[in-house]
Image (cartoon, rainbow, N blue to C red):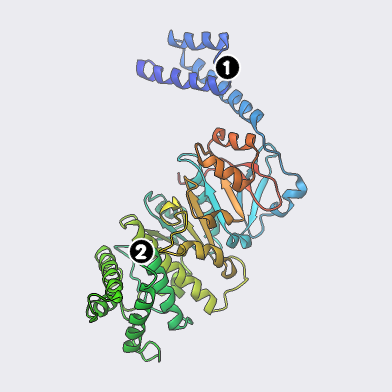
Amino acid sequence: MDDPLSRFRMIKDLTKMTEHARLDQNQQMKNALLSLSAGAPEGFARSLGKMLQLRATAEILRENKFAVPTSEELAPYSSPHNANLIGFVEEANVPFFYPRDRFPAGHTVLGDSGSGKTNHILNQVLQTAVHNPAWIFDSTKIDFRHTLKINSSFLVIDIQEALRFNPLEVPEGVKPRHHIVSFVTVFVKSLGLLEGSIGFLIEALTELYDKFGVFDGTNEGYPTLYDLYDLITNKRIHKYSREAGFKQSSESRLKALLISCPETFSVSRGFPISELCKLNCVFEVKGLVESHAQCVMCWLLFSLFHYYIANGQRGVGLALQAVIDEAMWAAKPGYNEAIGFAPLAYLMNQSRETGLSMLIGSQTTDLNESVFKSELKLCFRMTGKDIMRIKDQFRLTDEQAAYLSKLQGGRACVKVPGIDPFIIRIPRNRIQ
């Protein structure tokens, strides 16, 4: 406190707190801050800070326009059995548990940077991973490798360096022709090829599978993306035909993907989906351009989805939780006529029947509409234009929507079916 700069910063912080406590015009408070400027002791500053914090919290609660759910409304969320703790209902201070069997219906988490969003996602992943496997797709923040500090079962896999995955390898039980369509659809939609490229690539892959004996089961391995690239490159097509355009675009997209991940797709048999789906994994896609990251992620998730369907994984609760934080790269908004639909949006709409849960986190509401169809939605502190869309999706009043920008860190607005939106306090995890 003898350092003038430290004292200045302390006074600045306390001045800001007087605004939150609505005491910035109080003469006694002005005198107290003036005495600190004149050299009042450090103990006085600490006592003043504690008092202002309590007063600021009381003021925020007074502005809270959200009702506290009744005990009858909270009854389905009161038992910890086969459930994750989401948080504690504000003012009532009772725990809010969400049944894990309901997670396949979707879980969306919104919030500005520093609001507590990632802390909540980490809490959910660590709870889920004790009972069910979790896959995390980490694009930029590299926050999730720290889950190893608590749960050492997590494998941190750099997509470019450590993953060995052949997207042309047919998952156990899946029909080869179904897998061809799934692979091609993800490739074309994720990388923005024209619709006509689907037929061109299906024909090429059918030829390749036939050559390797995949259809009749005589294959010892599977063709790789390198084999597909060579087949397309060596195809003789009239340069002025329509197919020439499909050939050129498919060839260029494959080449770029193979340059980005030369080792990842070099294997005939990679990590089988039937084994990966039993593991807790953090897939780091930080070094890839968005379209490549989305393509690889969707290949993994579509392979898992079809593996579950082919092997009777239907209607049996939560099977695996897939997590995408900062999801703007993976779930872009809108409808593109050339693309038709977003692969991730399709998965979110269809995956609940297989027990595949999608947990989507984002700092923006500029996301595909399917993200907002989740049954469990949380909104931490948000500001700006995003509030209007949240108001519609959470069915908030004007006063409730305005209150979102005043939420303290670690507080969130919750929307679940059958209960009006309410506020909960999220426990802080131990690895942040």
Circle 1 or circle 2, nearest the eye: 2
Amino acid type shown at disc 1: Leu
Rendered location of residue 246, percent (x, y):
31, 72
What kind of residue is marked 2? Leu
Q: Residue 319, can we see it?
A: no
Q: Is residue 39 above or below residue 247?
A: above
Position of the N terminus, as image quadrant, is top left
Question: Going by the image, does 315 lie left or right of 365?
Answer: right
Q: Which residue is mark 2?
A: 191
- Per the image, the residue denoted by label 1 is 23
At horizontal 47% and vertical 63% (from top left) the residue drawn is 341
The residue shown at (23%, 79%) is: 238
x and y, in percent, of residue 220 in the image: 34, 87
Toward which corner of the image does residue 354 lie, by quadrant? bottom right
Q: In screen coordinates, is 308 left or right of 296?
A: right
297 up-or-down from 167: above or below: above
> Is tag 1's residue or tag 2's residue first in the polypeptide sequence?
1
Q: Secondary structure at mark 2?
A: helix
Give how far apart the Cα atoms at labels 1 and 2 are: 56 Å
Numbered-mark total: 2
